[in-house]
Amino acid sequence: MRKNIVIFLVLFNLPLFIFSQGVPQLLVANVPMEDSVHLATDIYLPSSQGKFPTILYLLPYDRRTRERQQFCQFLVSRGYAVVIQNPRGKFGSQGKYLPFIDELKDFEQTLEWVLNQGWCSGEIGIFGSSSSSYNAQLLASTQNPSIKAIINHSGLTDIDQLFFPGGAFRLNTMFPWLNYFYLEKRVPWDQWDDIFKKAPLAEQMEWDTYLLHQMARKSVATHRVKVPVMHITGWNDIVYRQSFFLYEDIKHFNASVPQHMMVGPWEHNYNHSQTSFGDVDFGPESILSYRDFRINIANWFDRYLKGINVPVGQHQFFIMGMNKWVYVPTFPIQEAQAHIFFLDAENQMIDSLPSSENTYSYIFDPEDPVPTFGGVNSHLFPKESGPRDQTRFIEREDVISFQTDTLSEELYILGEMKVVLFASSDVPDTDFTAKLMVQQTDGVLRIIEDGIIRASNRNSRLSKEWLEKDEVYRFEIDLGYTGIELKPKERLVLHISSSNFPKYNVNHNFKKDPLEAMDFQKANQTIYTGGEHSSYLSITTVPKEFIQQHVKF
């Protein structure tokens, strides 16, 4: 394992920091894998001699950005060695980059190499952000006894749900990401709209759909993660659901494992100073500064790698609308309850079962899809992401709108949401979408969250079940989670349709993978309410008194 290792000792030519451990050292190493491929690695060490608890940071992005170098320096100042490494084919590492597939073997060999170094105490923490958090979770799932804690910052866990939420392809996130980071090909951002519209879509991608599905199958074995995890994410982060998935799976399989959640209003790649996302300014309390971000991480590692009794505190959730943090001891919250709104005649959502059955019909034309605008959307297209006004969609004939009565008092949503939809179609495959909004007193329809279900994948992502013409089916549309306050005289509004493009790829409505379909056909869609086919919205609410008790003023 140690042959042909090249190591250089250099001093930083970076902004001055005050280090409790003295001026840090940087070792540059080419760490060998068993097939003789070498991975470019930087090692940050305190200047003092000794063995140190060690933080691994395994990422496909430039390991030497100013921000990452300063982050590593900060951890060194807290008494840690830091190993930051790029995978095969990235930033000086040999080999070819292939995301999500067969990366674990390299990570394990790197861990073995680190544990054999004289400066490593044998206590390992792993930091991960976005795809590097996936790497951290993969390593943690090996249950190597040296791994004591991880940080999951806006991380990836369930790759299948990341690529294919509800069975549809997350088009405007994964296509550009894979094109750039996997193939290293740059496309001007103003050209993507035209690329997304071309059919068949698979011909625009320089990888086959089989490889795409192979990547999607490489999710983390969450039941094997048994080390303390700190989760940091945001309600407007395109991958925030992944953090909740990991948190809940660990809680289910290994309930005694310590976990801490911090969820702000942030988007992906949050810059730690921004307060506005979409059309909403969440105010100064929404800021998680670089300093506080780093201190939280170091405190977590201090507690579980060094055994220092650093208080971690309760879960922290930013409640949008009131723009304040609440601190809660447990999640899901014990006082929370599912609040059901049934879809009714006259486009209403009501608290009780409808007294009569009703249907709503519309035509879904895949050549004229409902355009994506706002929401928990790709950070790669910031003008189309974040909370934005949805009133532009009110007049579309392929959007069915439902609304509650205006509220007489505050309503607090903090937890998961979903739509159960009874629907039929005259085509063998199609999509149904749901978009949840709050209608403010000024008339603005502020989006909260949205979701999609591909009809043929309604029961499984692994197999197709085609629709029978005009038969009624039950579809469950996942709307993720949120933390938001609705004020008196506001109301909830739900839009049901069959597209949200290009957030998700359009279904061509045939018995064929929409990524490979050339032709389009219209679909006659019918939504059912009342009786045995009572479609409904379910949200998780918490009492006003609970919020008042746990809010940070």
Image (cartoon, grey):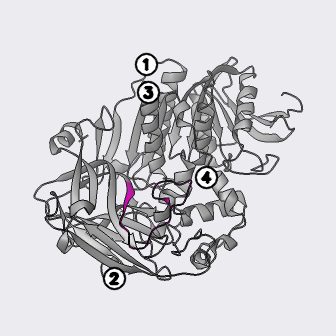
Q: Which residue: 43% across, 73% down?
A: 469
Is residue 470 visible to us here? yes
Helix, strand or loop at disc 4? helix
Percent across and percent down for residue 500 are: 44, 70
Q: Identify the magenta region.
A: 457-479
Percent across and percent down for residue 518 are: 62, 79
Q: Is residue 379 left or right of residue 476?
A: right
Q: Main secondary structure of the magenta part?
A: loop
Residue 216 is tagged as 4
- Discs 4/1, front: 4
Q: Residue 340: which quarter of the image? A: bottom left
Q: Which residue: 29% across, 66% down?
A: 494
Of the residues shown, which amino acid type is indicated by label 4?
Ala
- For the residues labelled 3 and 1, the Cα–Cα distance comes to 14 Å
Q: Is residue 83 left or right of residue 159?
A: right
Residue 258 is tagged as 3
Of the residues shown, which amino acid type is indicated by label 3?
Pro
